[in-house]
Amino acid sequence: MHTASMPTHDQCEQARLARDARFDGLFFTAVRSTGIYCRPVCPAPPPRPKNVSYYPSAAAASAAGYRPCLRCRPELSPDDASLLQDHTLHRALALLNEGILQDQSATALATAMGLSARQLQRLFVARLGATPAQLHSTRRLLLAKQLLTETALPVTHIALAAGFNSLRRFNSAFLAGCGMPPSALRRQRGAVNGGEPVLRLAYRPPLDFAAMLAFLRKRSLPGIECINDDSYQRVIVANGSASLIRVTADPKRPELRLQLGTTDPRAIPAIVARVRRVFDLDADLATVHASLQHEPLLARGIAQRPGLRIPGGWDGFEVAARAVLGQQVSVAAATTLARRLVERFGEHLPGMPEGLDRQFPAPATLVEAPLESIGLPRTRAATLRAVALACAEGRLDFSRAQTLEQFIQQAVALPGIGPWTAHYMALRAMGMPDAFPAGDLVLQQVLGQGQRLSERATEARSQAWRPWRAYAVLHLWHLSAEPSEPTQEP
């Protein structure tokens, strides 16, 4: 019985017997008589308590020798969002999700976190019951299991998506981890429609998908994104090849549907991770709301829009450039500048449909670009070139291994970047839940309820909402008559 980051044994037992969806992802049930581990919501007849053990993660159950259930499908379980409250673990998991262990060792992950390999392993085992390597291995096998079940992709492509360059090694690892060869699972799952693969991405409700799309649509990048009332579509470039993705909401389940165009299968894990970040699918809003609803204004906002989440951006530099373009202008004006930037300096992608045939300019492209030619004021053009140079040289990066304070310090060291822009980047590019642009005029006006608060007073007011201030920002923006992004920066 593992107790770290888990409900008590009695809670696990009650949740398992009740098939309580609130506990999905908080623990896994391993059944000694079958050698299988399940989600708490598994529809199979409940096993006898004497045959049951509980584990804090799928990786812990897998490391103990259990294989994933074919009925409840642990690969569809939402992550345990309570792990986000451990900032070190949260950052380490973000890097793991971005694939750091695909090409590097756990020592490299520990170094990125500023820890020794032993310290990092102790942290993972204490909270998740498994080492970083075991977690990485389990996740890639569960992704393979999902691709085998939900898509018609060839097994060789699925092996590449799971991080295996050898089909023989993939077959061996899948047999050891899942109890059957990939071909047997594919035969069991029956026919799947051909065409572009579609993956199910689970989350903990609620999710206001319409509000998320509305926010993203107002700030979309023409030529790169197409967002309507019920879907998000974008052109992406993975390993040199362009393709389209489309995200929609499942009307019956707490899941989004990710439609993948023709793409390098090795890019699939990174695409899934980015989509989850853009739509903030790993959040637990119950925990967030418990911290925010003591503030009457926020309680009103939560009551009106309980499913608001942090709307992310696909790429860090895109968000950074968009933030600079948006300094001291309206959202509409910033979008016009972004369209001009993409048309003038973005790469045209042949073979892609009109309106989704551009790639955002790389940082190196904008370092010496005549940005004034798109109507950008000289000072803001200089700021954007400085941001592009810092990104090209690695002085500004959007890795989630860093803390909010570290990123803000990096960003405000650049000319023309003040706290508002830095926090906006952290909020949208990195999904940092405590980012809070206290210099935002809308926040100051809404909190002042008719009288504008100072930046210092706004910052002081926000301290009670840590570490979830980014969610407060979204609610306060929506409480204003016209959600916007004004700034006090020069």
Image: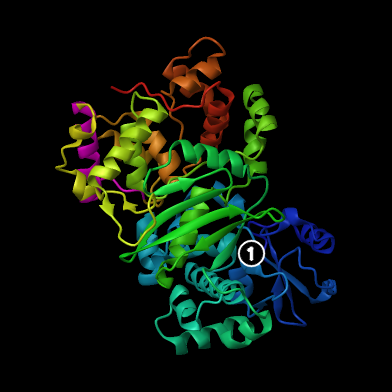
* Mark count: 1
Q: Is residue 454 above or below residue 382?
A: above
Q: Residue at x 20, y 36 (%)?
A: 371
Q: Is residue 316 magenta?
A: no
Residue 61 visible in the shown view: yes
Q: Which residues are magenta?
A: 378-398
Residue 38 x %, y %: 71, 70
Image quadrant containing the C terminus:
top left
Q: Residue at x 64, y 40 (%)?
A: 307
Quadrant hosting residue 13: bottom right
Q: Is residue 227 left or right of residue 307?
A: left
Quadrant hosting residue 381: top left
Q: Amino acid at mark 1?
A: Leu
Q: Residue at x 25, y 40 (%)?
A: 387
Q: Is residue 76 left or right of residue 115?
A: right
Q: Is residue 427 left or right of residue 151?
A: left
